Amino acid sequence: MIEIQQCTKKYGDFIAVNNLSLNVAESEIFGLLGPNGAGKSTTIKMMVGLIKPDSGAITVGGYDISQDPVNAKRILAYIPEKGYIFEKLTAWEYLTFISGLYNLEEETFRKNAEEYLKIFGLSDWKNEIIGNFSQGMTQRLLLASSFMRNPKVMILDEPHNGLDPKGIRILKDILFRLQNKGMTILLSTHIIAIAEQICDKIAIINKGSIAAEGTNVDLKHYAKSNDKTLEDIFLRLTSDYEK
């Protein structure tokens, strides 16, 4: 469903992403792990068409994100690490705005918007100005605005930012439910335990390249005998840390 073929992105002499290839299958929850500056966010921005790779190609649902961005973006939703939201709007006005951008049918919009506002505990706040929301409430609204579209592909960059434990649990439950309905999900996170719990496959990125990739079982093949957890593997592959 998502295919990255030998993509490289440079900023001057700095190589942010180095000849990276990656495949995410349909109905898969795929985790992207890496330390700060590893190239995760750059990779994601290339996936969603915010920046173009210097070389290589990316397809989403068979659409080339550079050559056919409109069709690619119709089927995907993206939650950035630091999402921008119009604080002068109410929650409902914001969801209405997003619905208009993606030409959702009125009945579908109202049904889905009400459903996700309820799931995220925002129903009583739907007519409140977003500027009065806490960080966690704003993050829940951003998530609701993407889920209500029923995209085929969901790309989430640190979606747990600002969420309390209850919010994180709600998000995990939704991701499992939507995966079972056929959604493909790519999740970038610093929370290794969450990646370990919910991801079918994981890629560990370091210095713009894939250091290891596979299921939790597969990653054990990269491990030393004293690597007992994904955290152990992650630390060994991405730093000079030694137990």
Image (cartoon, rainbow, N blue to C red):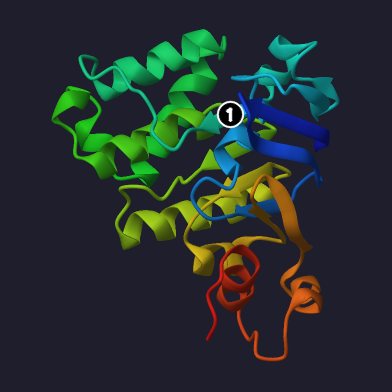
Q: Is residue 79 left or right of 89 when viewed as pictured?
A: right
* Residue in the foreground of this view, choosing between 233 and 37: 37
* Picture coordinates of residue 74, whole percent (x, y): 67, 18
Dot 1, crowdedness within 10 Å: few (<14), some or many (≥20)? many
Residue at 39% of width from left, 45% of height from top?
A: 119
The residue drawn where x is 51% and y is 9% is 101
5 over 95 or under it: above or below: below
Vertical placement of 236 versus 35: above or below? Answer: below
Q: Quadrant of the N terminus?
A: top right
Q: Amino acid at mark 1?
A: Ala
Q: Is residue 2 left or right of residue 236?
A: right
Looking at this view, is 109 or 140 the one in front?
Answer: 140
Q: Is residue 215 placed above or below 140 in the rendered structure?
A: below
Does the rendering let one see residue 93?
Answer: yes
Residue 135 in the image: state x and y as whole percent. 24, 40
Left or right: 24 in relation to 139: right
Q: Residue at x 75, y 15 (%)?
A: 66
User: Which residue is identified by label 1?
Assistant: 77
Q: Which quadrant of the figure has residue 170?
A: bottom left
